[in-house]
Image (spheres, rainbow, N blue to C red):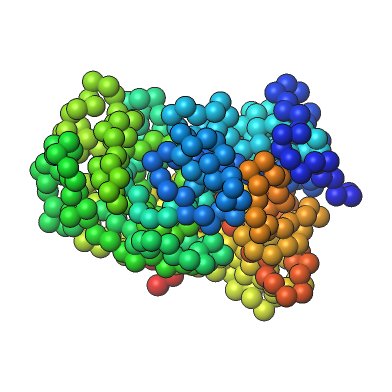
Amino acid sequence: MLDVVAHTHDVRELDTIESGVGDAVDAALEDGNGLLRLAPNWVPRSFLHPGNRLKLDPRDTYAFGLSRGGIDERWFGSTTEAANDDRRQDEGLSYVVHRDRRFTLRDAVAARGEALIGERLWRDYGRWPVYSKFFDNMGPIPLHMHQDAHHAGLVGQEGKPEGYYFPPQHNHVANAFPYTFFGLSPNVTKADIRDALASWDDGDNRILDHSVAYRLRPGTGWLVGPGILHAPGSLCTYEPQWGSDVFGMYQNVVEGRTVEWDLLVKDVPEERSRDLDHLVDQLDWEANVDPWFKANHFLEPVLVADTRDQGYADRWVVYGRVHGRQWFSARELTVDPGCRCTIVDPGATSFIVVQGEGTANGRPLRSPAMIGFNELTEDEYFVSWQAARAGVSYVNTSTTEPLVLLRYFGPDVDADVPEVGAARA
């Protein structure tokens, strides 16, 4: 099939459709040989400071308006809405682009769920339950946690484990603080954290005194379960995670900037919003004070199979289980200049090209140097379950540069996903 691309490079010139999406999905899958092209999905955060490594045109950093804050996230394959104040109706939702039209990936899954994500995920969840993003900040962000299923369920939300990988292509500079605080020192007590929260309005609550910082290294990552306190540092991070945007900020002053109490209790029942014991109980205490925290959460790449002599390498970069369950996983595929490979994946996947150019099932791939806020790209696709299981053909059309892409998967897709620590075994 000849390559069929949108007739425009500007998302504002596309027709947005909300009805007849099933037929539109069928046409897009046929033209895309099982792949759906996605438009860039930018998300601002009013309380953070953009790190300027998303390839977004710097003139568009505040494209949502100054009051909304700068754009420091790009979400991939998302059917999850961003939980931002004053948000746009579709904020956080990825759009499929086909010819001169667009429609949300969420609507596409609702219309053709089994074909797109597979019978099991569709039966168990009725949606694409995960997403990934680039998180890019200039400095550290507040020590925070994501609620587990029980505590998030109290406000009608879902809990959120997440994974981190620091792609070298997006970390040519480390920015202001390439260290992340994870968990708590083993000798910290619940009373220590309660006292820190009780002093919220008295100045810096100094909660970082109770945590431990680890230096971040491009090409590695971490697996972080719900209820674990963490204050991400300043590397640009690829973050596969559960499809939820719940969080609670436990640190009230960061680099001289204050954090409102509302961001601590954003996802807490109103009647418990001043209940310090409840806020402490949200934490997975055993995981936070684990003396072997790094050994149980640090990730290094693991080859799926050693195919490097064939001109490509596929590596697990986010893997392992949280409380015995495989919530998501991610791989990094590198195809050498002038080489090709066919990859059979265990399930549907969403990928982003971070370096080079080429094709996937004949679709054009290109990692751009700079992206305008409204510009379309050829670096992001959703691979349907059927196409993934049949095998996707990747070709590197460059004679000098590797083709590198990151892709993530939904829950329980592969019994062979490694355990944390596999790289050191």
User: Which residue sits at x=58%, y=29%?
Assistant: 90
User: Which residue sits at x=29%, y=39%?
Assistant: 259
Closer to the camera, 215 or 300? 215
Identify whether 241 is placed above or below 51. Answer: above
Identify whether 113 is placed above or below 358. Answer: above
| Residue 92 drawn at (x, y percent) | 54, 36
| Residue 133 drawn at (x, y percent) | 52, 48
Regarding residue 1, the answer to whether it shows in the image is yes
User: Which residue sits at x=22%, y=25%?
Assistant: 272
| Residue 86 drawn at (x, y percent) | 47, 27
The quadrant in which residue 422 appears is: bottom left
Quarter containing the C terminus: bottom left
Identify whether 39 is placed above or below 58. Answer: above
Query: How many badges with numbers are in the image?
Result: 0
User: Which residue sits at x=54%, y=28%?
Assistant: 88
Which residue of the protein is positioned furthest toward the right in this rendering?
A: 2
| Residue 315 drawn at (x, y percent) | 56, 65
